[in-house]
């Protein structure tokens, strides 16, 4: 039996979604975040870094979202949810499968961290912390995110999905950064293609089944 170690409101939703798309049997172990929004230490019993998602398959432990997606596709996919090797769509698929964590998520995480700094320091230095945080977000992080969002929108214009005209696992990978951007950035909400993409992924039966598995634990941090 496949087991997904699922931290609430995390990128782990994508793993459940892929499992549902592939119609595989699995079980979910759900973990709640602490007051500091970190994963509980119990996750370190599954993987030394204590991160989520983690997949267990007959004693094999696989961590990292992209690696888990690739593992499941290679082991159980039977050629589904990815373009034929050597095609232009395959090259785009590879890029977006890895760009989700390599390029898209880092500035989103940085923005979330910087926005939380003023709440996590002693009250008497909060005005200074807030000024520094807002300055970093405005001058460094948000310009990067605007570039990312423009690029996502332009790529989706080429066929409606990130690897062309067909839904692939690259769309599962990119779903989290797109949803995170839409939840936090007005610039993202002004992009009709991102909004249409969000509606399209949420309309997929497998997406809805995965969401129903974990209920309120699904979603992205705000």
Image (spheres, rainbow, N blue to C red):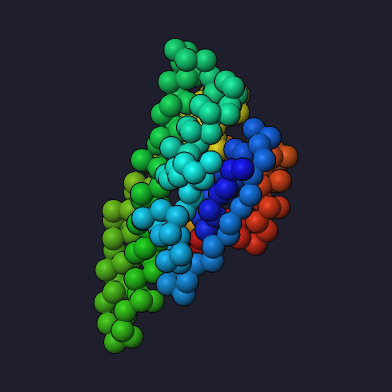
In the image, residue 67 sits, relative to residue 219, either above or below, namely above
Residue 188 seen anywhere in this rendered image of the structure: no
Q: Quadrant of the N terminus?
A: top right
| Residue furthest front as drawn | 59
| Residue furthest top as drawn | 86
Asked whether, in this view, residue 136 is left or right of residue 177, the answer is: left
Rendered location of residue 6, percent (x, y): 54, 55
Rendered location of residue 200, percent (x, y): 66, 38
In the image, residue 92 sits, relative to residue 202, either above or below, namely above
Residue at x 48% of width, y 49% of height: 54
Q: Residue 19's quadrant in the figure?
A: top right
Rendered location of residue 82, percent (x, y): 54, 24
Foreground: 60 or 176?
Answer: 60
Rendered location of residue 192, percent (x, y): 59, 40
Residue at x 55% of width, y 38% of height: 172
Foreground: 102 or 159?
Answer: 102
Q: Residue 133's quadrant in the figure?
A: bottom left
Asked whether, in this view, residue 83 is left or right of residue 98, the answer is: right
Foreground: 52 or 220?
Answer: 52
Residue at x 58% of width, y 27% of height: 77
């Amino acid at each position: 039996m496949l087991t997904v170690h699922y931290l609430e409101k995390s990128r782990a939703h994508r793993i459940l979604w892929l499992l549902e798309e592939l119609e595989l049997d699995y079980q979910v172990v759900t973990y709640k975040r602490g007051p500091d929004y970190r994963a509980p230490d119990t996750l370190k019993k599954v993987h030394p870094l204590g991160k989520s998602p983690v997949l267990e398959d007959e004693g094999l432990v696989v961590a990292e979202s992209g690696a888990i997606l690739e593992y499941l596709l290679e082991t159980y996919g039977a050629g589904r949810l990815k373009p034929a090797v050597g095609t232009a769509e395959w090259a785009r698929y590879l890029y977006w499968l890895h760009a989700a964590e390599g390029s898209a998520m880092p500035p989103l995480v940085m923005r979330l961290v910087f926005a939380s700094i003023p709440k996590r320091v002693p009250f008497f230095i909060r005005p200074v912390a807030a000024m520094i945080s807002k300055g970093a977000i405005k001058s460094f992080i948000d310009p990067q995110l605007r570039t990312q969002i423009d690029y996502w929108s332009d790529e989706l214009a080429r066929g409606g999905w990130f690897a062309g005209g067909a839904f692939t696992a690259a769309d599962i990978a990119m779903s989290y950064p797109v949803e995170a951007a839409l939840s936090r950035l007005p610039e993202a909400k002004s992009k009709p293609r991102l909004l249409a993409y969000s509606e399209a992924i949420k309309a997929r039966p497998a997406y809805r089944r995965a969401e129903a598995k974990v209920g309120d634990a699904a979603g992205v941090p705000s």
